[in-house]
Amino acid sequence: MEKTTDHEEWLSGVSLADHEDVYNLYDSITNFEGSGRFYTTKEVTNDGYQYFIKAEGVVEHLFLESDEAKFAFLDYLAKNYTDAEEGDVTKWYNLKKELGRVD
């Protein structure tokens, strides 16, 4: 399995076409499960947890080596792929879904 810790590089190979894709990625990471085209696994280490994120059609997996790395990635995702207030991606997604609009 090829893996990278550079989330910006990994995201450049993942096509986040719309708010559904962004939310599915966020949901997969926060719930450690499959969501849309994404699947996240969590492994226990001596120092905490590690996360592996897979995206359909992408060979490389994103490796987040700690909870800090996970939260930094989620913050990056919220700031760069949404206009969520205070980084609340779930609230942002629900609003997009309710209004049926895509930016």
Image: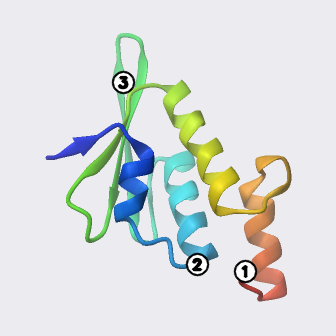
> Mark 3 or 2 closer to N-term?
2
Is 91 rendered above or below residue 52?
below
Is 21 rendered above or below residue 83?
below
> Mark 3 or 1 closer to N-term?
3
Image quarter of the C terminus: bottom right
Measured as percent of width and height from the top left, residue 82 is found at 70, 62
Seen from this angle, which residue lies furthest left? 1
Res. 93 image quadrant: bottom right
Would residue 89 appear left or right of 95 to someone viewing this image? left
What residue is drawn where x is 83% and y is 73%? Answer: 95
Between label 3 and label 1, give the one nearer the viewer.
Answer: 1
Q: Real-space Cα distance between discs 3 and 2?
A: 32 Å
Q: Secondary structure at mark 3?
A: strand
Residue 103 disc label: 1
Query: Label 1: how many residues lie within 10 Å, few (<14), some (14-19) or many (20+)?
Result: few
Query: Label 3: how many residues lie within 10 Å, few (<14), some (14-19) or many (20+)?
Result: few
Of the residues shown, which amino acid type is indicated by label 1? Asp
Q: Which residue is mark 2?
A: 18
What residue is drawn where x is 28% and y is 41%? Answer: 4
Q: Which residue is mark 3?
A: 44
